[in-house]
Image (cartoon, helix red, strand yellow):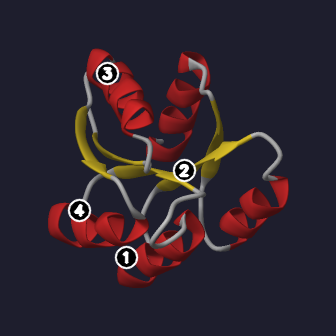
């Protein structure tokens, strides 16, 4: 069981992901913006982060960079909509360890978690 932070500006996406992760036995925290994610990461030190790329306030790539600056070993998977390949590549270069495309498939989320937590 891992402590996973779900970051997405869409409440229904956080709720859907949280429900899935809890069913898989994980502890889940949430953040709705990139800046909330950075603060929550510093305060809670989750084992892993599922981080949306496109958000108001602070986008996921900026949040990724700030979290990795605070903790170079942070385990982060980006969550992205179709058609954002260039942003995914930028996120991977900035230290993301994997990515999941929305709407996400349960098996793909599980595969990303297993890959990152291994």
* Identity of the residue drawn at 36% across and 72% down: 35
- SS for tag 2? strand
Judging by the rendered image, the residue that carries numbered circle 4 is 45
Of the residues under marks 3 and 2, which one precedes in the sequence? 3
Of the residues under marks 1 and 4, which one precedes in the sequence? 4
Residue 43 is situated, as x and y percent measured from the top left of the image, at 16, 68
Of the residues under marks 3 and 4, which one precedes in the sequence? 3
Labels 3 and 2 touching (C-beta < 8 A): no
In space, the residues marked 3 and 2 are separated at their CA atoms by 18 Å
Residue 19: image tag = 3
The crowding category of the residue bearing disc 3, from other C-alpha atoms within 10 Å (few below 14, some 14 to 19, many at least 20), is some
* Identity of the residue drawn at 56% across and 36% down: 112
Labels 1 and 4 touching (C-beta < 8 A): yes
Q: Nearer the viewer, residue 11 or 41?
A: 11
In space, the residues marked 3 and 1 are separated at their CA atoms by 27 Å
Residue 77 is situated, as x and y percent measured from the top left of the image, at 54, 50
* Identity of the residue drawn at 37% across and 20% down: 20
Q: Quadrant of residue 115?
A: top right
Task: Give the foreground label among 3 and 2.
Answer: 3
Task: Give the foreground label among 3 and 1.
Answer: 3
Labels 3 and 4 touching (C-beta < 8 A): no
Residue 77: image tag = 2
Residue 79 is situated, as x and y percent measured from the top left of the image, at 58, 45
- SS for tag 1? loop
Residue 106 versus residue 70 in the image, above or below: above
Residue 16 versus residue 67 in the image, above or below: above
Residue 71: image tag = 1
The crowding category of the residue bearing disc 1, from other C-alpha atoms within 10 Å (few below 14, some 14 to 19, many at least 20), is few
- On screen, residue 80 versus residue 18, left or right, reads right
- SS for tag 4? loop
Of the residues under marks 4 and 2, which one precedes in the sequence? 4
């Amino acid at each position: 069981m891992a402590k996973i932070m779900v970051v997405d500006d869409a409440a229904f996406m956080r709720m859907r992901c949280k429900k899935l992760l809890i069913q898989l036995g994980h502890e889940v925290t949430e953040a709705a913006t990139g800046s909330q994610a950075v603060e929550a990461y510093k305060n809670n030190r989750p084992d892993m982060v599922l981080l949306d790329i496109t958000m108001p306030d602070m986008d996921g790539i900026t949040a990724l960079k700030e979290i990795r600056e605070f903790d170079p070993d942070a385990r982060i998977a980006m969550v992205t909509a179709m058609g954002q390949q260039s942003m995914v590549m930028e996120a991977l270069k900035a230290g993301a360890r994997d990515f999941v495309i929305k709407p996400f498939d349960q098996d793909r989320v599980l595969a990303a978690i297993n890959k990152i937590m291994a």
